[in-house]
Amino acid sequence: MKVGIVTFIDYSNYGNRLQNYALQEYLRMHGFETETILNEKYEDYKYTEEYSKKILIHWIKSIIKYCYGLIMPRQKSFICNIFDDNLKKQRKTKNINFTNKYIKETKYVVREGFPHKRQLNQYDYLIAGSDQIWNPCMGAATDFFFLQNVPKEKRISFSASVGLVEIPKKRKEQWIKYINDMKYISVRERAAQKLINELTNKKATVLLDPTMIIERRVWDKLINSKSFAYANKRYIVTYILGKISNSEEEELQEIGRMLNAKIIRLNDRRYPKEFTADVIDFLQLITNARLVITDSFHACVFSILYYKQFYVLQRQGPYNNIYSRIEELLANFHLENHAVMSIHEVYMSMLNLNERKVECITDKEINEINHILEKERRNADMYINIL
């Protein structure tokens, strides 16, 4: 059976590349021939009015801080970022190389607003997932991401993410229609399952993100596919997409001194080598770290899969409304104690932990993780076997 995967195509985003690869490999393990459908989002759908205002306010504040010289070295404004685009291009180029090697993509590109029936009808099914493809505030929840270009009997979702607890009023009617037009629905969050049930009375299956559904040996193979620059070195990884304060930066450095560990900042433009890391570098750094501090969903995922001690910050900035997916991930694995509001909380936790506890999560947590993963992988197998 031939399947087309419908998801975001974002070569600069580690999580996007990892979930795309994971879903492809999972489907192949179940005997499907797969390829990911290249697509361009229709820009008119990019943001709701409310979300656009949050983005605008965020950038206005950044520009004001820049003009008055108040901005922190790592918190560069929109103006600064224009000059730093070269670093993002380098990361993107490396991840395109990863994609070319490991992910099969179509030779054609689907554009929103065009039917592309001839190309899409070649598939037995289109599978939408995972990522936040049904979040109307993230340039998604359009005809394409709800598979409107193919007959209803071919429309399947796999761990699709909504990332919201409610749908914006202006998009709700259309969103409900999209859901009603799906044949089989699985989502990543229980909040999305509840939302779908309340709005449509349809039942959706909740599945883990595909990065957790495939066996760890698949990731081990990728991680071991190239040499690791920090092998046998003590380091802390931060992968922070939001902002941290000046005092938190000082406390972060103190945490490094307490653990006698180098701090590797994966999303800090002051450190070009780390900022331009590719997908496999990202995996290697997370899975070999002494400690992970992040506000990223997929950094949490791989910290859990590899039993890393980690702390999750609630992201500061205009994107706070997507934190619910991280809360649910932690709740699924009974790891809510790893959520903190700030790096100051991490610092205080470090003062009260001994060295062993810092370097790995507890045996009880590891046993719980393995038990839940085994159960959730069986659930995914049951779902995919309906096809």
Image: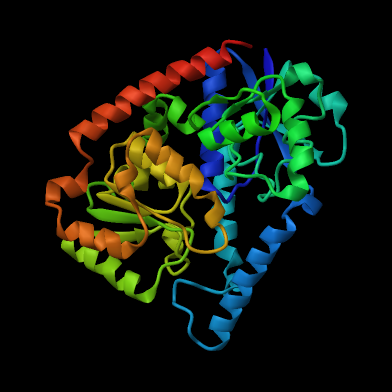
- The answer to whether residue 247 is seen in the rendering is yes
User: Relative to 44, does residue 155 appear above or below in the rendering?
Assistant: above
Name the image colouring.
rainbow
- Residue 248 left/right relative to 323: left
- Residue 158 left/right relative to 228: right
Closer to us: 256 or 275:
256
Identity of the residue drawn at 63% across and 44% down = 166
Identity of the residue drawn at 48% across and 72% down = 75
Closer to us: 318 or 72:
318
Closer to us: 273 or 339:
339
Residue 237 in the image, given as x and y percentages of width and height: 34, 54
User: Relative to 307, does residue 206 appear above or below in the rendering?
Assistant: above
- Residue 277 left/right relative to 368: right
Which quadrant of the figure has residue 164?
top right
Identity of the residue drawn at 67% across and 23% down = 156
Residue 48 in the image, given as x and y percentages of width and height: 73, 55
Q: Quadrant of the N terminus?
A: top right
- The answer to whether residue 107 is seen in the rendering is no
Number of numbered discs present? 0
User: Relative to 307, does residue 74 appear above or below in the rendering?
Assistant: below
Which quadrant of the figure has residue 178?
top right
Q: Residue furthest bottom?
A: 68
Identity of the residue drawn at 36% across and 43% down = 284
Residue 209 in the image, given as x and y percentages of width and height: 50, 32
Residue 319 in the image, given as x and y percentages of width and height: 56, 57
Q: Quadrant of the C terminus?
A: top right
